[in-house]
Amino acid sequence: MPVVEVLRKFARFVGPGIIISVAYMDPGNYSTSVSGGAQFRYELLFVIFVSNIFALILQSLCVKLGTITGLDLAENCRRHLPHRLNLVVFFFSELAIIATDLAEVVGTAISLQILFGIPLLWGVALTILDVLIILIFYKPEEQTMKQVRFFELFVTTLVSATVICFILELCKITVPRKIELFQGFFPTKLIFKDQQAMYISLGILGATVMPHSLFLGSSVVKPRLHEYDVKRQGKCSVQPSLAAIEYSLNYSYAELIISLFIIATFVNSAILIVAAATLYGQPDAADADLTSIYNLLSYYISPAAGLIFALAMLFSGQSAGVVCTMAGQIVSQGFIQWTCKPWITRLFTRLIAILPCFVMAAFLGEKGISSILNFSQVVLSLILPVVSAPLIYFTSNSNIMSVSTTGHESGIDEATETTSLTRDPVTKVNYANGRVLTVSSILVWFTISGLNLYLVISYLMGADVHF
């Protein structure tokens, strides 16, 4: 296929990866990365890089699961897990949505306070409105492909604004010894020597590989598959045709990889670098929060630098709120086929997230709300193994990941509209994970679980990890 045709086809797949990348650059990432940069300078850049590699492996499994089965992770859990186990995973998934909502609530409230002088308590209350506004426009059961593309464009605009803000921020800071910055991307023993470094590393991991993103990643690939089958066959079944899978799978992988590395890795690294360059060595660095980095950027660089940071936080908070709303719908409908109206379930979830924010903001102010934000990211890291285990199991199961060729033309390329390969009508094509991907995903799972276990044991033994 000519390069121009490949690029033109790839352009039609741009969108899902950007939506997924939003889950890796929400205000929770700001909090943990700011703490990491303020306390350990550039040394935790390696954790950000590894976290994004973990995210890439798990999200690739999500793309594969949604593409091959035509069902998202929540729907596959309902279909293939025992009922009680399905409910257990559902409970932890909803807990992850609430913990994620905490980050959106805190980030939005703090940015509103900085930009418009709105008190934290009022800012927390105003976050209810964005959920309701989003749900007015987000109605997946009624959306056409054109509406899906418009929604993706809306999210892309918010993401682009966030990226631009951090490009401007990086242009304003000074890094005297750039070699130290690059060395930060290499492995370090620090996280095993310092309990607080381990705590922040797990927070970065939880803020990067967020459980709700796995449900999101397995769902956003479905509209293009359905569109392909409707155009070619006039209808679509739950599982996409083999031709649709062959048409889209590799392009979905490519779009995901490019989006995560260009957007998520860049933004997360930029947050830590900006914090390291402005906060490290300052008297209050150990207690650095989102407001303190705004104040220091404004003082040491310029008021414009602080304003750009606050705008980036607002943009990322709103885009993260959008995708968290999507993920909440996917979870409730997929696991238990929830019949309540979407706005009721999301409003209920957001209210649960708002309550602790209200309490902390009322009694402890900015420091309290910053602490609950960091804690929510560690909770997400603890939940991640529970949610990712079914994903690894499903994508490694040949019975679940096989596609029958019966009734489908296969090997059809849109550019030529010719059949390049004919298969036996009863043949099944197995898309289950190969040995390398299976081993890699299991290693990721054991690494995350092992680090979580280490943190919990350390805490129970009296280590000061600021829970």
Image: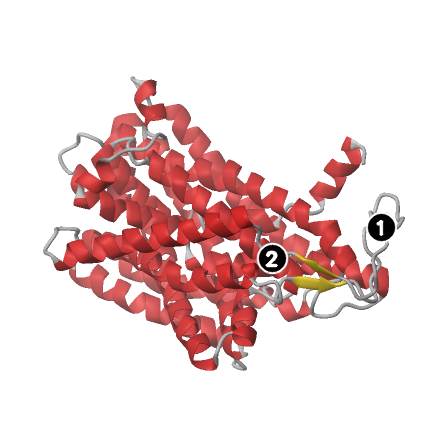
- Residue closer to the observer: 138 or 119: 138
Question: Residue at 75% across / 50% down in the picture?
Answer: 247
- Residue closer to the observer: 361 or 401: 401
- In the figure, residue 173 lies in which quadrant? top left
Where is the N terminus found, in terms of image quarters?
top right
Q: Earlier in the sequence, mark 1 or mark 2?
A: 1
For label 2, the residue is 432
Q: Secondary structure at mark 1?
A: loop
Question: Residue at 41% across / 49% down in the picture?
Answer: 443
| Amino acid type of the residue tagged 2 in the rendering | Ala
- Residue closer to the observer: 39 or 350: 39
Q: How many numbered markers are drawn?
A: 2
Does residue 78 lie above or below 20 as drawn? below
Q: CA distance from mark 1 to mark 2?
A: 21 Å
Q: Secondary structure at mark 2?
A: loop
For label 1, the residue is 421
